[in-house]
Image (spheres, rainbow, N blue to C red):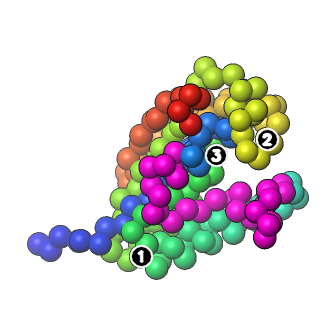
Amino acid sequence: MAVATNIQKVIIMSGASGSGKTTLIRQTFPRAQRCSADDHFMTEGGEYVFKPAELQEAHAACLRKFVALVSAGEAMVLVDNTNTSWVQVAPYVALASAFAPSGVSISMMLVDATGVDSSALSARCAHGVPESTVRKQLADLLTMWSNPTPPEIARVAKITKIRCDLAVF
């Protein structure tokens, strides 16, 4: 039996704004290709300008970039969004499984900020996310990770939780 040698790695990040997802990616996976809805809001001058009316398009653009990278056979592709529900994660898992030319290893990485004050996360978030939004993200993440992983995701994805350490990230 032949063993696939070009297995792609897909890592789907999950965590509240300000928890250190992007910092962790840059420090741990500097050569990986990164997809993020945040990229949609970056100006040519490198300034982040959030436009709530464009959030759906930002996530659609992120998903399109993800499919292009996976289809092209990139060795490692990371999804750098909050991903606060399994509904948000499911398309990435399904598309990675469908489009990876030589097979894929899918991991979910939770930057766990349980017990971290939402105001601290909001204050350190590079994108000015309001504390009320961070508080909702934390509640949604608690609900998501307190429930069993849906079978269609558990079947193909490895789950890893990393504790959010504000002193490190």
Queried whether the magenta region covers residue 26, the answer comes back as yes
Nearer-the-camera pick, 120 or 82 = 120
Q: Is residue 81 above or below residue 5?
A: above
Q: Earlier in the sequence, mark 1 or mark 2?
A: 1
Question: Which residue is denoted by mark 2 in the rendering?
Answer: 129
| Amino acid at circle 3 | Thr
Nearer-the-camera pick, 5 or 33 = 33
Q: Is residue 16 above or below residue 135?
A: below
Camera-near label (1 vs 2) is: 2
Q: Which mark is residue 82?
A: 3
For residue 2, which quarter of the picture?
bottom left
From which residue to which does the magenta span run?
A: 24-50
x, y (%) of residue 54? 83, 62
The residue at the point 46 percent across, 35 percent down is: 162
Q: Earlier in the sequence, mark 3 or mark 2?
A: 3
- Going by the image, does 150 lie left or right of 47? left
The residue at the point 79 percent across, 56 percent down is: 48
Q: Residues within 10 Å of mark 1 (few under 14, many from 20)?
A: many
Nearer-the-camera pick, 167 or 98 = 167
Q: Earlier in the sequence, mark 1 or mark 3?
A: 1
x, y (%) of residue 27? 48, 49
The reply to whether dot 1 and dot 3 touch (C-beta < 8 Å) is no
The reply to whether dot 1 and dot 2 touch (C-beta < 8 Å) is no
Question: Which residue is denoted by mark 1 in the rendering?
Answer: 73
- Going by the image, does 23 lie left or right of 55? left
The residue at the point 79 percent across, 67 percent down is: 45
